[in-house]
Amino acid sequence: MKKTKTMTITMIALMTAILCILAPISIPLSTVPISLGTFGVYLCAAILGPKNGIICVLIYLMLGLVGIPVFAEGMAGFGVLAGPTGGYLIGYLVIAFFTGFFTKKWGKNPLIVFLGMVIGTIGCYLIGTIWLGLQLNLGVWQALMAGVIPFIPGDIIKMVACTAISLPVRKQIKVYLEVGK
């Protein structure tokens, strides 16, 4: 049992580190940058499940909050979380929950896992777009154009890639944990 707890803590740390490495990789695009943050969240949650995926995102958000440059474009601090893109960062928790939940429940079916990522992303878009619109006093269409529409093709590509990568990795990790018991 101890080995499993140690392995879980290690996996959370490893996946959080991967998220912290991927998220700053970004392309500036008006107010909201295109980043690999969502890909990192999909990966964390699909491999670790909903609870540990959410823990990864919370640790990531705390690291950024205290000043470690882990947000898109190497940004950090409370100002980023409270600023126009902060809603999308909070929305990462929704992505982690739905991606992890669908993977945990129906992880052998890549289409269902992909659906969980889509639902989580819609939740992230909803929170982020409302936050962005309120922060910048944008109308609905303006907020969608600034924070959703340009990102849909890239997010679909990230979800497909993550589904292809994470399910075999998750399977191997489960095999390893079973051997360790």
Image (spheres, rainbow, N blue to C red):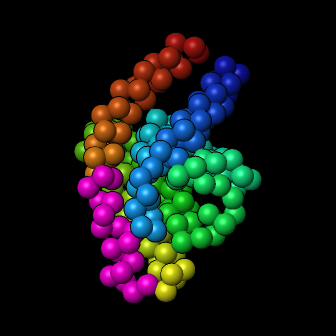
10 to 44, vertically: above or below: above
Residue 98 visible in image: no
- Residue 152 in the figure: left or right of residue 43: left
Q: Residue at x 30, y 34 (%)?
A: 164
Q: Residue furthest top?
A: 179
Residue 166 in the image, given as x and y percentages of width and height: 39, 33
Splitting the image into 4 quarters, where does residue 89 fall? bottom right
Q: Residue at x 36, y 81 (%)?
A: 142
Is the residue 144 above or below the residue 9 in the image? below
Please tell me whether residue 119 belongs to the stretch shown in magenta: no
Left or right: residue 10 versus residue 137 is: right
Magenta segment? 138-155
Give me the residue at 40% from left, 62% from top: 29
Quadrant of the drawing holding the N terminus:
top right
Judge from the rendering whether residue 38 lies leftward or rightward of residue 52; answer left or right.
left
User: Which quadrant of the figure has residue 34?
Assistant: bottom left
Give whichever of 99, 181 is nearer the camera: 99
Q: Nearer the viewer, residue 12 or 8?
A: 12
x and y, in percent, of residue 126 in the image: 42, 71
Q: Is residue 41 left or right of residue 164?
A: right
